[in-house]
Image (cartoon, rainbow, N blue to C red):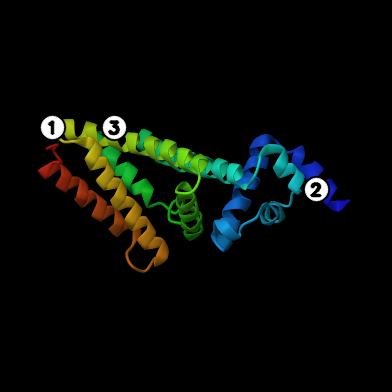
Protein backbone atom coordinates (compact mmCIF):
# COMPACT_ATOMS: atom_id res chain seq x y z
CA UNK A 1 0.00 0.00 0.00
CA UNK A 2 2.80 2.43 0.88
CA UNK A 3 4.50 1.77 -2.48
CA UNK A 4 1.24 2.43 -4.31
CA UNK A 5 0.74 5.69 -2.43
CA UNK A 6 4.32 6.82 -3.23
CA UNK A 7 3.83 5.96 -6.89
CA UNK A 8 0.58 7.93 -7.01
CA UNK A 9 2.34 10.89 -5.39
CA UNK A 10 5.16 10.77 -7.93
CA UNK A 11 2.70 10.39 -10.80
CA UNK A 12 1.06 13.71 -9.84
CA UNK A 13 4.35 15.60 -9.71
CA UNK A 14 4.96 18.02 -12.59
CA UNK A 15 6.49 16.13 -15.51
CA UNK A 16 9.79 18.02 -15.32
CA UNK A 17 10.23 17.23 -11.61
CA UNK A 18 9.34 13.60 -12.17
CA UNK A 19 11.84 13.33 -15.00
CA UNK A 20 14.52 15.10 -12.95
CA UNK A 21 14.02 12.58 -10.14
CA UNK A 22 14.35 9.64 -12.53
CA UNK A 23 17.41 11.13 -14.24
CA UNK A 24 19.18 11.72 -10.91
CA UNK A 25 18.34 8.23 -9.66
CA UNK A 26 19.63 6.65 -12.88
CA UNK A 27 22.82 8.69 -12.62
CA UNK A 28 23.44 7.49 -9.05
CA UNK A 29 22.87 3.87 -10.03
CA UNK A 30 25.13 4.04 -13.07
CA UNK A 31 27.85 5.76 -11.03
CA UNK A 32 27.78 3.16 -8.27
CA UNK A 33 27.05 -0.05 -10.19
CA UNK A 34 27.69 0.50 -13.89
CA UNK A 35 25.24 -0.15 -16.68
CA UNK A 36 25.29 -3.96 -16.62
CA UNK A 37 24.56 -4.23 -12.89
CA UNK A 38 21.94 -1.48 -12.83
CA UNK A 39 18.35 -2.69 -13.04
CA UNK A 40 15.05 -0.90 -13.40
CA UNK A 41 14.25 -1.97 -9.83
CA UNK A 42 17.47 -0.35 -8.59
CA UNK A 43 16.55 2.91 -10.30
CA UNK A 44 13.02 2.78 -8.93
CA UNK A 45 14.34 2.23 -5.41
CA UNK A 46 16.67 5.22 -5.79
CA UNK A 47 13.87 7.43 -7.15
CA UNK A 48 11.34 6.07 -4.63
CA UNK A 49 8.83 5.17 -7.32
CA UNK A 50 7.17 1.99 -8.51
CA UNK A 51 8.37 -0.15 -11.40
CA UNK A 52 4.98 0.44 -12.98
CA UNK A 53 5.60 4.18 -13.14
CA UNK A 54 8.88 3.68 -15.00
CA UNK A 55 7.14 1.26 -17.37
CA UNK A 56 4.48 3.90 -18.00
CA UNK A 57 7.12 6.16 -19.58
CA UNK A 58 9.75 3.75 -20.93
CA UNK A 59 9.71 0.42 -22.74
CA UNK A 60 12.80 -0.86 -20.92
CA UNK A 61 16.17 0.03 -19.43
CA UNK A 62 17.71 0.91 -22.77
CA UNK A 63 15.00 3.50 -23.50
CA UNK A 64 15.36 4.96 -20.01
CA UNK A 65 19.14 5.26 -20.24
CA UNK A 66 18.90 6.78 -23.72
CA UNK A 67 16.55 9.45 -22.39
CA UNK A 68 18.80 10.11 -19.39
CA UNK A 69 21.86 10.35 -21.63
CA UNK A 70 20.17 12.90 -23.88
CA UNK A 71 18.81 14.92 -20.96
CA UNK A 72 22.22 15.18 -19.29
CA UNK A 73 24.06 15.96 -22.55
CA UNK A 74 21.56 18.68 -23.44
CA UNK A 75 21.78 20.17 -19.95
CA UNK A 76 25.57 20.30 -20.02
CA UNK A 77 25.56 21.83 -23.49
CA UNK A 78 23.04 24.43 -22.36
CA UNK A 79 25.44 25.40 -19.56
CA UNK A 80 28.25 25.87 -22.08
CA UNK A 81 26.02 27.79 -24.46
CA UNK A 82 24.85 30.14 -21.70
CA UNK A 83 28.46 30.88 -20.72
CA UNK A 84 29.25 31.79 -24.34
CA UNK A 85 26.12 33.91 -24.80
CA UNK A 86 26.79 35.87 -21.60
CA UNK A 87 30.27 36.79 -22.83
CA UNK A 88 30.67 40.04 -24.70
CA UNK A 89 33.68 40.82 -26.84
CA UNK A 90 35.62 38.92 -29.47
CA UNK A 91 35.08 35.39 -30.78
CA UNK A 92 38.28 34.42 -28.97
CA UNK A 93 36.81 35.61 -25.67
CA UNK A 94 33.65 33.59 -26.28
CA UNK A 95 35.77 30.53 -27.03
CA UNK A 96 37.63 31.13 -23.75
CA UNK A 97 34.27 31.27 -21.96
CA UNK A 98 33.40 27.87 -23.45
CA UNK A 99 36.70 26.41 -22.23
CA UNK A 100 36.37 27.90 -18.75
CA UNK A 101 32.80 26.61 -18.39
CA UNK A 102 34.05 23.13 -19.31
CA UNK A 103 36.08 23.10 -16.09
CA UNK A 104 33.33 24.33 -13.77
CA UNK A 105 32.17 22.07 -10.89
CA UNK A 106 28.98 21.11 -12.75
CA UNK A 107 31.17 19.29 -15.29
CA UNK A 108 34.00 18.13 -13.03
CA UNK A 109 32.03 15.45 -11.23
CA UNK A 110 33.25 11.89 -10.66
CA UNK A 111 29.71 10.47 -10.60
CA UNK A 112 29.05 12.15 -13.93
CA UNK A 113 32.18 10.54 -15.37
CA UNK A 114 31.12 7.06 -14.21
CA UNK A 115 27.70 7.51 -15.78
CA UNK A 116 29.23 8.94 -18.95
CA UNK A 117 31.50 5.93 -19.32
CA UNK A 118 28.39 3.75 -19.11
CA UNK A 119 26.75 5.81 -21.86
CA UNK A 120 29.81 5.53 -24.07
CA UNK A 121 30.06 1.77 -23.58
CA UNK A 122 26.38 1.31 -24.42
CA UNK A 123 26.71 3.43 -27.56
CA UNK A 124 28.83 0.62 -29.00
CA UNK A 125 26.21 -2.00 -28.23
CA UNK A 126 22.82 -0.48 -28.97
CA UNK A 127 21.53 1.63 -31.85
CA UNK A 128 19.30 3.72 -29.61
CA UNK A 129 22.17 4.88 -27.41
CA UNK A 130 24.42 5.30 -30.47
CA UNK A 131 21.81 7.60 -32.02
CA UNK A 132 21.74 9.75 -28.89
CA UNK A 133 25.54 9.88 -28.85
CA UNK A 134 25.74 10.89 -32.51
CA UNK A 135 23.06 13.54 -32.09
CA UNK A 136 24.41 15.13 -28.91
CA UNK A 137 28.08 14.90 -29.88
CA UNK A 138 27.21 16.40 -33.25
CA UNK A 139 25.54 19.37 -31.56
CA UNK A 140 28.51 19.82 -29.21
CA UNK A 141 31.00 19.67 -32.08
CA UNK A 142 28.94 22.12 -34.15
CA UNK A 143 29.02 24.64 -31.29
CA UNK A 144 32.78 24.24 -30.98
CA UNK A 145 33.24 24.52 -34.76
CA UNK A 146 31.27 27.78 -34.84
CA UNK A 147 33.42 29.26 -32.10
CA UNK A 148 36.67 28.15 -33.73
CA UNK A 149 35.58 29.33 -37.18
CA UNK A 150 34.73 32.80 -35.87
CA UNK A 151 38.00 32.95 -33.93
CA UNK A 152 40.00 31.84 -36.98
CA UNK A 153 38.36 34.49 -39.18
CA UNK A 154 39.03 37.21 -36.63
CA UNK A 155 42.69 36.20 -36.51
CA UNK A 156 43.28 35.88 -40.24
CA UNK A 157 43.24 32.06 -40.38
CA UNK A 158 40.13 31.52 -42.50
CA UNK A 159 41.82 28.57 -44.27
CA UNK A 160 42.01 26.52 -41.06
CA UNK A 161 40.02 23.28 -41.22
CA UNK A 162 37.75 23.99 -38.27
CA UNK A 163 36.24 20.49 -38.25
CA UNK A 164 39.61 18.91 -37.48
CA UNK A 165 40.47 21.67 -35.02
CA UNK A 166 37.18 21.13 -33.20
CA UNK A 167 37.71 17.37 -33.04
CA UNK A 168 41.19 17.88 -31.62
CA UNK A 169 40.10 20.41 -28.99
CA UNK A 170 37.11 18.23 -28.07
CA UNK A 171 39.39 15.22 -27.58
CA UNK A 172 41.72 17.29 -25.39
CA UNK A 173 38.80 18.50 -23.27
CA UNK A 174 37.49 14.94 -22.88
CA UNK A 175 40.92 13.58 -21.97
CA UNK A 176 41.56 16.26 -19.37
CA UNK A 177 38.09 15.78 -17.94
CA UNK A 178 38.57 12.02 -17.51
CA UNK A 179 42.07 12.55 -16.08
CA UNK A 180 40.80 15.05 -13.51
CA UNK A 181 37.84 12.86 -12.50
CA UNK A 182 40.17 9.89 -11.98
CA UNK A 183 42.48 11.96 -9.79
CA UNK A 184 41.65 15.62 -9.03
CA UNK A 185 45.15 16.07 -7.61
CA UNK A 186 46.71 15.64 -11.06
CA UNK A 187 46.02 19.25 -12.07
CA UNK A 188 43.74 22.12 -11.11
CA UNK A 189 40.80 23.28 -13.22
CA UNK A 190 42.71 26.52 -13.88
CA UNK A 191 45.63 24.48 -15.24
CA UNK A 192 43.23 22.53 -17.45
CA UNK A 193 41.98 25.83 -18.87
CA UNK A 194 45.58 26.92 -19.52
CA UNK A 195 46.34 23.71 -21.44
CA UNK A 196 43.28 24.19 -23.66
CA UNK A 197 44.02 27.87 -24.22
CA UNK A 198 47.56 26.92 -25.29
CA UNK A 199 46.07 24.38 -27.71
CA UNK A 200 43.86 27.06 -29.25
CA UNK A 201 46.83 29.43 -29.54
CA UNK A 202 48.75 26.68 -31.32
CA UNK A 203 45.88 26.01 -33.69
CA UNK A 204 45.64 29.69 -34.54
CA UNK A 205 49.39 30.03 -35.03
CA UNK A 206 49.89 26.89 -37.11
CA UNK A 207 46.43 26.03 -38.32
CA UNK A 208 45.03 22.62 -39.25
CA UNK A 209 44.75 22.56 -43.01
CA UNK A 210 43.23 19.95 -45.25
CA UNK A 211 45.66 18.03 -47.44
Q: Cα distance, mark 1 to mark 2?
A: 60 Å
Taking the image as shown, residue 143 lies to the left or right of residue 125, namely left
Are circles 3 and 2 on residues that touch, CB within 8 Å? no
Seen at 70% across and 52% down, the residue is: 44
Q: Secondary structure at mark 2?
A: helix
Q: Nearer the viewer, mark 1 or mark 3?
A: 1
* Residue labelled with disc 3: 146
Q: How crowded is the residue under tag 1: few (<14 C-alpha within 10 Å), some, or many (20+)?
A: few
Q: Position of residue 64 (x, y in %)?
A: 61, 44
Of the image marks 3 and 2, the number of the one nearer the N terminus? 2
**Label 2 near label 1: C-beta < 8 Å?**
no
Residue indicated by mark 2:
6
In this figure, which residue is indicated by the disc labeled 1? 159
For the C terminus, give its image quadrant.
top left
Q: Is residue 182 above or below residue 154?
A: below
Distance of label 3 from label 2 (alpha carbons): 47 Å
Q: Quadrant of residue 54?
A: top right
165 or 190: which is nearer to us? Answer: 165
The kind of secondary structure element at disc 1 is loop
Amino acid sequence: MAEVQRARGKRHLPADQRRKSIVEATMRCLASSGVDKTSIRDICAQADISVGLISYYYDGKEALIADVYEAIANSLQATLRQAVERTEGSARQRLSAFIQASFKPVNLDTDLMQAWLSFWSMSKRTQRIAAVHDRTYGAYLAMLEDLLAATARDNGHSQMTVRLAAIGLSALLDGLWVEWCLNPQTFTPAEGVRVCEACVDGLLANGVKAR
